[in-house]
Amino acid sequence: MCLGIPGRIIERGDDRGLPMGVVDFGGVRRSCCLAYVADQVDVGDYVIVHVGFAISKVQESEARRTYESLREMSQLDELDWMRETADLGLAAFSQPEGPPAQHGGDA
């Protein structure tokens, strides 16, 4: 099963000609390739990220619905690991933006 997770772009940059960004997943921030969506997104936009690549832009309301669905799915015994990701993602919608946290790795 493949799973893309929504996150909010908090930084944009360039790495040797490749559009990159830092994406926030409910407080967890990761470097992400923006090549597939570079002409569609900017800082503050939400994207679906799969294995370190932003594969599509989504509206904030859709990102919220995705986290709500993940939370519901986490109620199944075999998907307990999803609960924390869903809870962190939903909590991010109620928190004001703060200073950027340190980040690293790929989503």
Image (cartoon, rainbow, N blue to C red):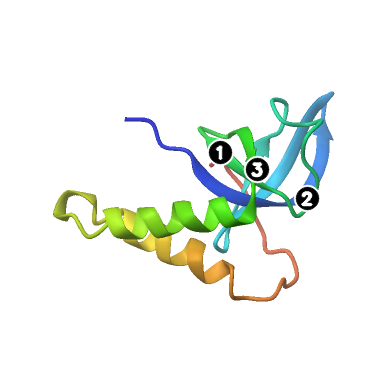
The amino acid sitting under disc 1 is Val
What's the mark number on residue 95? none
Quadrant in the rendering for residue 3: top left
| Quadrant including the N terminus | top left
Q: In the figure, is residue 64 to the left or right of 73?
A: right
Q: In the figure, is residue 57 to the left or right of 78?
A: right
What's the residue at 54%, 62% (across, down)? 26
Disc 1 vs disc 3: which is toward the camera? Answer: 1
Label 1, on which residue?
49
Label 2, on which residue?
11
The amino acid sitting under disc 2 is Glu
Disc 1 vs disc 2: which is toward the camera? Answer: 1
Label 3, on which residue?
31
What's the residue at 62%, 34% (across, down)? 56
Q: Residue 95 location, x and y as percent?
A: 62, 75
> Which residue is most to the left?
77
Q: Are marks 1 and 3 in contact (CB under 8 Å)?
A: no
The amino acid sitting under disc 3 is Ser
Instruction: Please name whichever residue, 54 or 57, is drawn nearer the observer in this view of the structure.
Output: 57
Q: Residue 107 location, x and y as percent?
A: 53, 42
What's the residue at 38%, 31% (across, down)? 2
